[in-house]
Image (cartoon, helix red, strand yellow):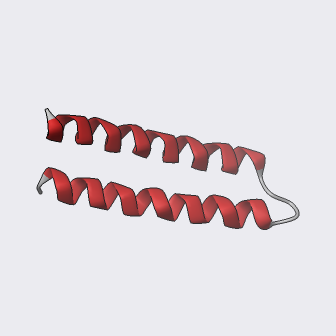
Amino acid sequence: MTIEARIRELGNRHRSLENAIQQEMGHPSADSLHLKALKLRKLRLKEQISALQEARTG
């Protein structure tokens, strides 16, 4: 898999997590632990994307 393809894949997962976070926050009884876990996963994806972009540009 190329770096660009991996960045796109991680970007798609990042957007999916953002949608899941927004949906969870829309519930009156949002689970704060679940939200925290989703946000942490989203942050890790963002870090991976940034690292790959830096590696790509050298």
Q: Nearer the viewer, residue 38 or 10?
A: 10
Q: Residue at x 29, y 35 (%)?
A: 51
Q: Split into 4 quadrants, where in the image is the N terminus?
A: bottom left
Q: Is residue 6 above or below residue 50?
A: below
Residue at the top extreme of this rendering: 58
Q: Residue 21 appears at what percent x and percent y?
A: 64, 58
Residue 38, horizontal then vertical, whole percent? 59, 50
Quadrant assignment for the C terminus: top left
- With 52 as the anchor, is 17 left or right in this view? right
Residue 21 drawn above or below residue 48: below
Say left or right for 36 vs 11: right
Q: Residue 34, image x and y in percent?
A: 68, 50
Count of numbered labels shown in the rendering:
0
From this viewpoint, which residue is outermost toward the front?
Answer: 57
Q: Residue at x 68, y 62 (%)?
A: 22
Looking at this view, is 16 or 50 the one in front?
50
In the rendered view, does 15 fall on the left or right side of 32?
left
Residue nearer the viewer, 57 or 5: 57
Residue at image x 16%, y 50%? 3
Report the front residue among 53 and 38: 53
Taking the image as shown, residue 6 lies to the left or right of residue 18, namely left
